[in-house]
Image (cartoon, rainbow, N blue to C red):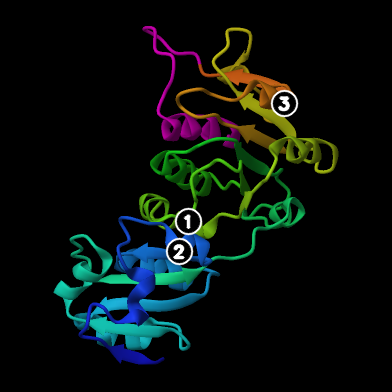
Amino acid sequence: MPIVEIDDVDDPRLDVYRQLNQTNLTAMSGRFIAESRLLVERLVASSYQVESILAAEQFRAELLTTAPPDTIIYLLRKELISAVIGFHFHRGMLACGLRQPNPTLGQLLANRTVIDTESGRTIIVCPHIVDPTNLAGVIRNACAFGVDGLILGPQCADPFSRRVVRVSMGTVLQLPIRIADDLIPELDMLYHTFACTRVATVLDDRATPLRSAERPRHLALLFGSEGHGLPQDIIEHCDELVTLPMKRGTDSLNLATSTGIFLYHYSQ
């Protein structure tokens, strides 16, 4: 693989890594950034193409044996990396990956991530999660419980933003994700074409308590935002309403916590 030693923080070849805390320009160019040695390793091991790696000189020998052969490696002094990316960074390694095309719903559902192909599908649908940390928690839980895919509404946070990639610990690279322009047709297709039962998680005394909810063979599980829950038009396109009873006047849980509880229940 080509190794390029750089000692000028203004070198234009490093532009994709520049001022990462101020912009999300990588989204517009079809790229994303993985920060830290661990996340770079997970990117290299994933199905995503690694365009380049930016690393401190100390990682030269390691990268010669672990980096993909067609990946450009930029080496510079460790203290210069912080100057390039715009904030203090002590981990010494970043990488730039190339985003994959947005899959169709059919392609998403054809991507089975669970080993047992006799089991039903589990899909998560999130119409409006704007907080990157919350989205990262959903993604991490989805991978942990063998979810087959994630469908996001058009107003959701970018699943390949720096923060989501980092907080999800790179699990976003293992989960098939579709960004839908309009979720209503997607929900109709999930039911009519793919036989998924659409289950809305809601705060409603009329909903079925989670402990009593039975697992359908093919499950599309919908989660709303922490502040507002699921929109009414989305709820109206669901087949079942399920709620998590809570005590002491608590009206909601952190989204990552609630997705973990629901996914654990439906995975049993």
Give the residue type that dot 2 points to.
Thr
Q: Depth check: 129 or 48 in front?
A: 129
Please give the label number shown on residue 238. 3
Residue appearing at x 74%, y 32% in the figure? 197
Residue 169 location, quadrant: bottom left
Image disc number at residue 160: 1
Residue 116's label in the rendered image is none
Looking at the image, is mark 1 or mark 3 earlier in the sequence?
1
Q: Is residue 56 above or below residue 23?
A: below
Q: How far from the left and from the top, in percent, is residue 179?
A: 62, 49
How crowded pointer 1 is (Cα within 10 Å; few <14, some 14-19, many 20+) is rated as many
Amino acid type of the residue tagged 1 in the rendering: Phe
Proximity of marks 1 and 2: CB atoms separated by less than 8 Å: yes
Q: Give 237 or 258, whichever is nearer the viewer.
A: 237
Q: Tell me: 218 left or right of 51.
A: right
Where the C terminus falls, by quadrant?
top right
- Please tell me whether residue 162 is drawn above or below residue 224 in the rendered image: below
Give the residue drawn at x 46%, y 88%.
69
SS under mark 2: helix
In the picture of the structure, the residue carrying the numbered disc 2 is 26
The answer to if 48 sits in the magenta stretch is no
Residue 105, position as x, y percentages in the image:
73, 50
Quadrant location of the N terminus? bottom left
